[in-house]
Image: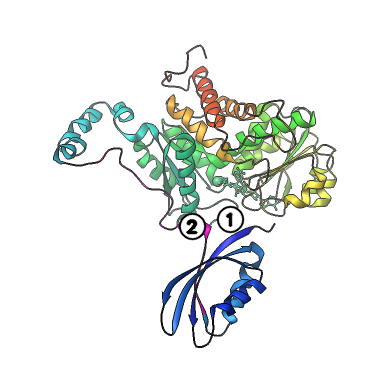
Amino acid sequence: MSIATTMIIRLEIRKSVASFGDVASALAAAGGDIVAIDVIRAGKELTIRDITVNVQDAANGEILTVLSTLPGIKVINVSDRTFLAHIGGKIEITPKMPIKNREDLSLVYTPGVARVCMAIAEDPGKAYSLTMKRNTVAVVTDGTAVLGLGDIGPEAAMPVMEGKAMLFKQLADIDAFPLCLDTKDPEQIISIVKAVSSGFGGINLEDISSPRCFEIERRLAAELDIPVFHDDQHGTAVVALAGLLNALKVVGKELAECRIVVVGIGAAGVSICRLLLAAGAGKICAVDREGILSREQVYSNAEWQWLAGATNPEGITGGLTEALRGADVFIGVSGPGVLSVEQLRSMASDNIVFAMANPSPEIEPELAEPYVRVLATGRSDYPNQINNVLCFPGIFRGALDCRAKAVNLEMKLAAARAIASVVHHDELNEQYIIPSIFNEKVVEQVRLAVIKAAVSTGMARRIPPDISEEG
Ligand SMILES: NC(=O)c1ccc[n+]([C@@H]2O[C@H](COP(=O)([O-])OP(=O)(O)OC[C@H]3O[C@@H](n4cnc5c(N)ncnc54)[C@H](O)[C@@H]3O)[C@@H](O)[C@H]2O)c1
Ligand SMILES: O=C(O)C[C@H](O)C(=O)O
Ligand SMILES: [Mg+2]
């Protein structure tokens, strides 16, 4: 998979030894296409220039090697558009009104603010109307399962959490704060999240590795009265179900009848299996590194133990190869390169493949395409992007608007059906089973469906004015 990127290379050129012409021909020979040149400093002996070069991803390294071997040339810095977009972070806090004079100051700060504080002290419920709580979500991670990159720590997790916060704001007008915790201890994570929770209307857990994530979420959901939602589990499951409902319509198969293989039984995989079962799937095979989960085995992971009893009704033994033989659906939430062409070819006709590992899917789409009827990945650069970003903005918008106590199964199923319904019957085809994240109907449809499900299951503490009680 080669993607073109734009690199910005800052070079020092010693004029007595080298010229810009040397640089230009070296870049062209290495496959770089110069699109801009900026002179940063022009001295008698040295000039410093920023060269903007379009290059195929694969040639990145080669270009730098070539430049570093040129006499009189020193590479000072290399950047690209992606890195430039991250300088100084991607989000900030903006006041809703300016403080221009003493009167403004005494209104928003002391002494005026004191009366508001006391009103909340007398009735903590007023935090919803007098603070940002009602529209604010904490995006909490410990950096242990960041995308498919693994345990890269809280600092390195921050760009993903900032990205989630951007998506919350742009798609659902929710203010989200990244909280990257420097601890992996579930008890500490639980107590930190509980201690900061009063300022938030909801908690989005993100990229916390399994099986720790299950206990952390279960305990927080039980001990807090605001929605706690582990996005990698439930957001992913909701979107996978939405995509599957539509993909099955395209191929003309039934959820209850088809054989589904889920690979990677971590945070996302466990929740996908659970939601598919709740939606009526009859034949699921759950596969992790040790092979197909089976009821003959005893697992220390409680989720695996439960799944082993609830899946694999045919008692298939072995690994992914055995599970996939004759299967109708492959759902991967594991890692890159897990799926081979040989395994794909052994699947049933009209097969569905969701290779959802990020950033590198279980199989390269170009390799898979000839052997798959409906193909989806988690990435935005291919058709059918099955990504939890289709779910979390709308599900939190709905949960916040009705002040839901939690996000229950009915709300998740409703969200999945709502996402699926955005693609109309007459639009459905192999390349279009799931709406784009830029489709404006997605958040609104998910919000409505989630509020209605919350109201009908007694989860809602408030009915927003645009929703009638009858539904
Ligand atoms: N597209 C999306 O919306 C989306 C959402 C969540 C997660 N993901 C992706 O799914 C992957 C898993 O995420 P997670 O949060 O569940 O992580 P996780 O660490 O909780 O789980 C990953 C699981 O995959 C298993 N696994 C890894 N390699 C395997 C292999 N070769 N064969 C079988 N099993 C294997 C691991 O043992 C583990 O149980 C990541 O790549 C992540 O980016 C995608
Ligand atoms: O962050 C994403 O793009 C999806 C998902 O949350 C993941 O962890 O891969
Ligand atoms: Mg994630």
Residue 117 horizontal/vertical position (percent): 22, 33
Answer with left or right where residue 267 lies relative to residue 464. right
Give the amino acid at mark 1: Leu
Q: Where residue 97 sits: x, y (%)?
A: 27, 38
The front one of 239 and 153 is 239
User: Is residue 285 located in the magenta-colored stretch of the structure?
Assistant: no
The residue depicted at 67 percent of the width and 40 percent of the height is: 384
Q: Is residue 75 magenta?
A: yes
Please report contact status of discs 2 and 1: CB closer than 8 Å, yes or no.
yes
Q: Residue lying farthest bottom? A: 16
Q: Is residue 319 visible?
A: no
Residue 404 to residue 13: above or below: above
Q: Residues within 10 Å of mark 2 (few under 14, many from 20)?
A: few
Q: Where is residue 248 drawn, in percent x and y?
A: 75, 31
Compared to residue 438, the image places residue 451 above or below, namely above
Q: Label 2's element?
A: helix
Residue drawn where x is 62% and y is 26% of the image: 417
- Could you say which is closer to the camera, residue 341 or residue 14? 14
Q: Magenta stretch? A: 74-100
* Residue 185 badge: none
Residue 376 at x, y percent in the picture = 70, 42
* Residue 149, numbered circle: 1
Disc 1 Cβ-to-ligand 1 distance below 8 Å: yes
Which is nearer the N-term, disc 2 or disc 1?
1
Mark 2 to mark 1: distance in Å?
10 Å
Crowding near the residue tagged with mark 1, few <14, some 14–19, many ≥20 C-alpha atoms within 10 Å: some
Q: Which element is circle 1 on?
A: loop
- Kindly give the residue lying farthest to the top in the view shown: 470
- The answer to whether residue 233 is left or right of residue 205 is right
Q: Amino acid at mark 2?
A: Ala
Residue 156 - label: 2
